[in-house]
Amino acid sequence: MLSALRDFFLRHGTKRAYFIALSGGLDSCVLLALSAKLREELSLDLRAIHINHQLSSNAAHWARHCKTLCDANAIDCIVHSVTLSLEAGDSTEEKAREKRYAAFANYLDHDAMVLTAHHQDDQAETLLLQLLRGAGLKGLSAMPVVKPFAKGFLGRPLLSFTRSTLKQYAEENALCWIEDESNANTILSRNFLRHEVMPLLQSRYPSVATTLARTAQHSAEAESLLHELGQQLYACVKAPLTDTLSVTALLQLSPAKQRLLLRHWIARKNYPLPSTAKMESILHDVLTARWDGKASVQWGDILLKRHRDAVYVMSSLSSHDHKEVLMWNVNETLLIDGIGSLQAMRVLGEGLNAASDLIRVSFRQGGERVYQRGMRKSLKNLMQEWRVPPWLRDRIPLLSINNTIVAVPGYFVDERYTAKASAMGFYLVWETNESQPSA
């Protein structure tokens, strides 16, 4: 293990900061001890971080134990306390994990790495949990050795070693560790697998942990190939509008490729993936809907909608008072609550030629007309020409001067108010979470 850990540090760099996630249990104590042995040899910037979840009456004792261990090894130790707010149906285990990793992220500088002491048995248990949840290849890939995390990375250098190997090392080196009483609670799924299922499997298949870990590696390789295929499909199927998919192009693919591409596209936006049932609703209810219909599918806070030949995915739209009127000083960023922000960049010879730094900002009420190519045109008809989805039409800011709409950021600037070649103009940047042009 010491040799493997040395190789890990050399492979991933000895100049970055490493934070050991120290619970005080057997696994993390072994990782701390091994890393401390290598610190001087490799000149490592080594620190430890203990998260006190405040869930056990022994939590304060565990924090002191971690501090004592670090003091004995002359390693700086951060003790960070978190508070869990649980609602009906929440998993204490999952919420604690979310809080723990959020805390880790807060301490990570650029390129730093958090090290956890996950081992081969953890990998096997994770694979079994994912199998029982009906996960796809991404879930069955379980845990990678290193992955991007916050501003840096998350590393698991002991993933190829079994729990028994770690325990043997701890006993031979007289390490002290604490036992979390919740680890014996078999109501928790992972503990049930650890204490009830894995021993039974090991009695019949002694190498089951190694075998399952190998399955996770095979799944990770297959998932990597599918990710490459997803990127290729996305390049062929993305619509002209920003980050949308063409329904026509999607329907040329097989259902399996449709599902692959939709998952790839949704994951690109860092949204949670839909369930199998929701995915089938997308394929059968959205892709085959009338082009002018209002087909949509929602899961959690995520909404997938179709408009004409484009499929959009977004966070559920926040409420907005479309009758709101604002006065915008173009020298400052305008934050529009629940929608987005407006900025004006001074550029020579293009953009909006505004005589005043103050511009009126409002939203579509109906009946608005704008001047385009020498004619007064209906804003409603123009938005249809611009293929603005119906749900966004009253959420796009309209910029007015002297009661005349002079610009619709991302779509239109009144030619009478366009900066001359020798004059400074305002290039408008409209940033929003919704799928639409941004400038």
Image (cartoon, rainbow, N blue to C red):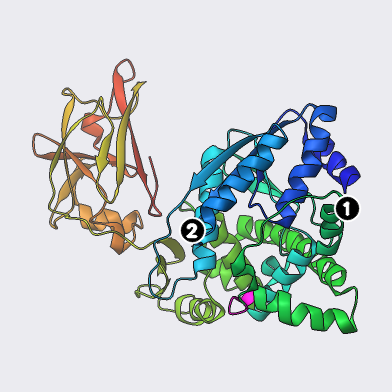
Callout 1: SS: helix
* Residue 171 shows in the view: yes
Q: Nearer the viewer, residue 174 or 212?
A: 174
The image quadrant of residue 360 is: top left
Task: State the quadrant of the C terminus.
Answer: top left
The image shows residue 195 at horizontal and vertical percentages of: 72, 77
Residue that numbered label 1 is attached to = 172
Q: Residues within 10 Å of mark 1 (few under 14, many from 20)?
A: few
The image shows residue 34 at horizontal and vertical percentages of: 81, 43
* Range of magenta residues: 186-190
For the residue marked with disc 2, what is the amino acid?
A: Thr
The residue depicted at 59 percent of the width and 52 percent of the height is: 62
Q: Earlier in the sequence, mark 1 or mark 2?
A: 1
Q: Which circle marks residue 244 in the picture?
A: 2
Residue 188 highlighted magenta (yes or no): yes
Q: Nearer the viewer, residue 10 or 86?
A: 86
Cα separation, mark 1 vs mark 2, equals 58 Å
Q: Nearer the viewer, residue 174 or 267?
A: 174
The image shows residue 223 at horizontal and vertical percentages of: 73, 63
The residue depicted at 24 percent of the width and 59 percent of the height is: 319
Of badges 1 and 2, nearer the viewer stands 1
